[in-house]
Amino acid sequence: MNQEVLLPDDYKPAENEPFMNKRQQEYFRRKLLDWKQDLMADSRDTIEGLQDGTRNIPDVADRASEETDRALELRTRDRQRKLVSKIDAALRRLDEGEFGYCEVTGEPISLKRLDARPIATMSLEAQERHERREKVHRDD
């Protein structure tokens, strides 16, 4: 399906090349896959830590502290799980040729924004409009 795209180690997407060309697609695919791999490794460490951490602690304050730590770990784990599904969605958009384009305007999302947040689905302008509308509705 996909032929191997040669990507120099120091490659960075540039504005002066065609938007979402094969090199840019490969760059973002690798970036997303690396990020996902890191999250999955963190997740495995968290699960192992939680399994190891199940022990009887007689001191109430120590036990409360441990339970707080576990709750924080689980919240972090849940956030990572949601992030992994957003990464998977971005990889799907890459496969479908929709990656890098704003889902609201259809315009290209800036390379700078995609490099900082490769799961972005909206241009910065569309995202800001969306957040302003959300804030207005929250204040009702």
Image (tube, rainbow, N blue to C red):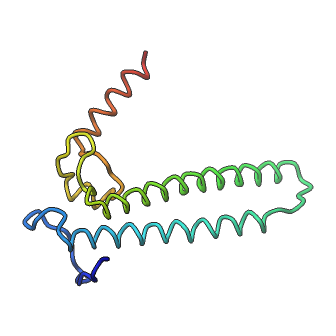
Question: Does residue 38 lie above or below 6 as drawn?
Answer: above
Residue 36 place in picture, x, y as percent: 47, 67
Residue 107 place in picture, x, y as percent: 17, 47
Question: Does residue 13 lie above or below 70 as drawn?
Answer: below
Say which of 105 and 111 sits in front: 105
Residue 58 place in picture, x, y as percent: 92, 55
Would residue 46 be found to the left or right of residue 51 on screen?
left
Residue located farthest toward the left when viewing the structure as drawn: 16
Instruction: Tell me what residue is drawn at x 31 percent, y 58 percent.
Output: 116
Say which of 123 and 90 sits in front: 90
Would residue 26 be found to the left or right of residue 81 on screen?
left
Instruction: Tell me what residue is drawn at x 22 percent, y 58 percent.
Output: 112
Question: Does residue 138 lie above or below 57 as drawn?
Answer: above
Instruction: Tell me what residue is drawn at x 49 percent, y 70 percent.
Output: 38
Write down the quadrant of residue 15 in the picture. Answer: bottom left
Say which of 19 and 118 sits in front: 19
Write down the quadrant of residue 106 in the picture. Answer: top left
Residue 74 place in picture, x, y as percent: 66, 53
Question: Does residue 2 lie above or below 70 as drawn?
Answer: below
- Figure quadrant of the C terminus: top left
Instruction: Tell me what residue is drawn at x 21 percent, y 74 percent.
Output: 23
Residue located farthest toward the top when viewing the structure as drawn: 140
Residue located farthest toward the front when viewing the structure as drawn: 1
